[in-house]
Amino acid sequence: MLGISVDTMRRWADQGRVATVRTDGGQREIEGPELARFAIELGEGPVDDGRAVSARNRFPGLVTRVVRDTVMAQVEIQAGPHRIVSLISAEAVDDLGLEPGVAAVATIKSTNVVVERPT
């Protein structure tokens, strides 16, 4: 969920960076509110590339796919566990040199966000 390994989370719990509780069987768990607090802490560090940008939702990742025609292109970026798909002009793809394997940052600023709860 956070894009980190179980071993990293275990180390951070041992260091006291995130609070855990023990189950009756002795396994460690992180309660929902604590996990939310920790996720916010992880996300507070902005991507620092020296630019001033109003959008705060920035996802550095790797371009995994580009599908284009003469006018538009679909660009897919894998940012940790998140797959982000963007429709941009083919000219922008060319200008940015976007192709699979290239590092890119998806910046999202939207007035509509749909939130679901998994079943």
Image (cartoon, helix red, strand yellow):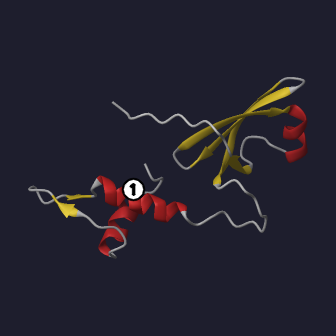
Could you tell me how many numbered marks the image carries?
A: 1
Percent x, y for residue 46?
Answer: 63, 64
Q: Determine which quarter of the picture holds residue 78.
A: top right
Identify the residue shown where x is 34% and y is 67%. 18
In this rendering, the answer to whether 51 lies above or below 110 is below
Q: Viewer-proximal residue, 7 or 25?
A: 25
Identify the residue shown where x is 55% and y is 64%. 44
Q: Determine which quarter of the picture holds residue 89.
A: top right
Identify the residue shown where x is 47% and y is 65%. 41
Percent x, y for residue 49?
Answer: 75, 66
Residue sticking out furthest to the bottom: 15
Judge left or right: residue 37 versus residue 67.
left
Residue sticking out furthest to the left: 24
In this rendering, the answer to whether 13 lies above or below 54 is below
Judge left or right: residue 88 versus residue 114.
right
Percent x, y for residue 48?
Answer: 70, 67
Judge left or right: residue 12 versus residue 86.
left
Q: Residues within 10 Å of mark 1 (few under 14, many from 20)?
A: few
Identify the residue shown where x is 53% and y is 60%. 43
Residue sticking out furthest to the top: 69
In this rendering, the answer to whether 104 lies above or below 9 is above
In this rendering, the answer to whether 59 lies above or below 21 is above
Dot 1: element: helix
Q: Determine which quarter of the picture holds residue 31.
A: bottom left
- Residue under label 1, please give it: 36
Amino acid type, residue under disc 1 in the picture = Ala
Q: Viewer-proximal residue, 15 or 7?
A: 15
Q: Quarter of the image containing the C terminus?
A: top left
Judge left or right: residue 62 versus residue 51.
left
Percent x, y for residue 38?
Answer: 41, 62
